[in-house]
Image: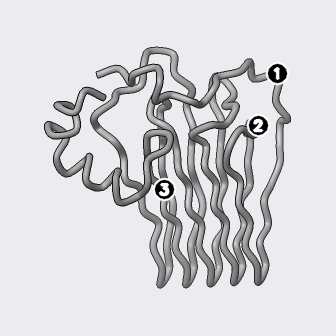
């Protein structure tokens, strides 16, 4: 099923128009990236006794392959990804969690950007979830649990 255009707010841009590398570091603090911002081709996220929240639902996402590399030590990292991109998720956890909640309602179109999420969580948590723009975590959970009710609402 294709995502209705009014719910799709991320923008696919040519890979050469974004920075090749960038990072977000949080040590004993919190960092947030949301709204319209440019995702680089290689994004490094590090949370050491802190938290990092990255929301790509309204971001400029480069076409082709991108990578998000995560390091989490005694902290938390939350990634919110838009439907319509291909997600590869591979991480390790030691006394922590490295979780991905996909959204099977919307299959990515042919030629969609691919985002590879890799990394590790030690005594911390990394959570990655696909959500529609403007949707809260609890709304996404309800929608995934009862998709027929959501589809009947006309969205």
Horizontal arrangement in the rendering, residue 104 relative to residue 76 (left or right): left
From the image, state whether disc 3 or disc 2 is nearer to you: 2
Helix, strand or loop for disc 2: loop
State whether residue 139 is above or below residue 106: below
In front here: 149 or 44? 149
User: Dots 1 and 2: beta carbons under 8 Å?
Assistant: no
**Residue depicted at x 42% and y 62%:** 99
Residue lying at the far front in this picture: please name it: 153
Q: Position of residue 16 (x, y in %)?
A: 82, 21
The residues tagged by marks 1 and 2 sit, at their Cα atoms, a distance apart of 12 Å
Q: Position of residue 140 (x, y in %)?
A: 35, 50
State whether residue 116 is above or below residue 29: above
Q: What residue is shown with label 1?
A: 16
Residue 149 figure quarter: top left
Q: What residue is shown with label 2?
A: 38
**Residue depicted at x 60% and y 49%:** 55
The residues tagged by marks 3 and 2 sit, at their Cα atoms, a distance apart of 19 Å
Q: What residue is shown with label 3?
A: 128
Residue 32 figure quarter: bottom right
Q: Position of residue 81 (x, y in %)?
A: 52, 44
């Amino acid at each position: 099923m294709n995502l209705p255009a009014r719910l799709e707010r991320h923008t696919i841009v040519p890979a050469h128009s974004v920075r090749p590398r960038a990072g977000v570091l949080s040590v004993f603090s919190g960092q947030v990236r949301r709204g319209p911002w440019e995702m680089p081709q290689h994004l490094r996220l590090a949370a050491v006794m802190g938290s990092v929240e990255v929301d790509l639902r309204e971001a400029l996402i480069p076409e082709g392959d991108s990578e998000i590399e995560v390091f989490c030590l005694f902290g938390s990292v939350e990634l919110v990804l838009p439907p319509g991109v291909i997600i590869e998720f591979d991480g390790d956890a030691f006394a922590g969690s490295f979780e991905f909640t996909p959204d099977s309602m919307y299959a990515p179109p042919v030629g969609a950007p691919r985002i590879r999420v890799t990394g590790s969580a030690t005594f911390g948590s990394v959570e990655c979830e696909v959500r529609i723009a403007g949707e809260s975590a609890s709304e996404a959970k309800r929608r995934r649990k009862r998709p027929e009710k959501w589809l009947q609402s006309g969205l």
